[in-house]
Amino acid sequence: MPDGSTPQAPLLQDQLCFALYATSRAFTKAYADLLGDLGVTYPQYLTLLVLWQHGDLAVQQIAEKLEIEGATATPMIKRMETLGLVTRTRSKKDERSVVVSLTDAGKALRDKAGDIPERLGCIVNVDGDQAQRLIKELNAIRLGMS
């Protein structure tokens, strides 16, 4: 530095990356508590959300929607199959592709999980309008990094 002083190291609490990281961990823990009664993990819940919204999908399509690698999605989906929530079948159009379908048990969880977003909103003290604004801002940040 020109004046001979030592530059101050960045402060952890001033870092956007840490605020996002710590908040993500807190959300994951809150979801774990909420999802315990359903018997699914947070990533499995996200996978169920995708399947509830889109119906049968190939593993690679699920991975794309969750923004994870197919190699990460496959073992999780296998565990969900063991839990009786989904089935996996080879695609008739392309045998290299595995199609994931909800079982009756997986479909039934949709009703049981219907209040999860509202319950989480109460935990974090965020109403629907504020949640939508945050989602929009966070999506813009993520997309800007692509």
Image: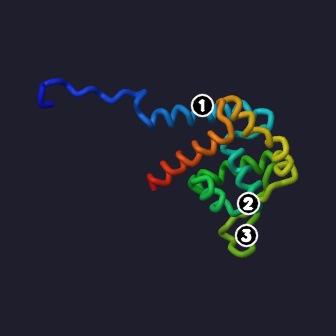
Residue highlighted by disc 1: 26
Residue 47 x %, y %: 70, 50
Q: Nearer the viewer, residue 52 or 70?
A: 52
Neighbours of disc 1 within 10 Å: few (<14), some (14-19), many (20+)? few
Quadrant including the N terminus: top left
**In the visual, does 15 lie left or right of 82?**
left
| Residue drawn where x is 41% and y is 33% of the image | 15
Q: Is label 2 in contact with label 3 (beta carbons under 8 Å)? A: no
Viewer-proximal residue, 4 or 105? Answer: 4
Count numbered badges in the picture: 3
For label 2, the SS is helix
Image position, residue 36 (x, y; %): 76, 33
How far apart marks 2 and 3 lie (CA) works out to: 17 Å
Q: Check disc 2 and report the residue beneath it.
A: 54
In the image, residue 92 sits, relative to residue 81, either above or below, namely below
Q: Residue at x 67, y 48 (%)?
A: 76
Dot placed on the residue nearer the N-terminal end, 2 or 3: 2
Q: Of circles 1 and 3, which is in front?
A: 1
Mark with earlier residue (2, 1): 1
Residue at the top extreme?
Answer: 5
For residue 54, above or below residue 120: below
Where is residue 89 drawn, in percent x and y? 76, 63
**Residue 10 occupies which quadrant of the picture?**
top left
Q: Identify which amino acid the numbered label 1 is placed on.
A: Ala
Which of the two discs, 2 and 3, sits closer to the camera? 2
Can you say which quadrant of the picture contains the C terminus? bottom left
> Is the residue marked by circle 2 packed among few (<14), some (14-19), or many (20+) residues within 10 Å?
few
| Alpha carbon separation for disc pair 1 and 3 | 38 Å
| Tag of residue 91 | 3
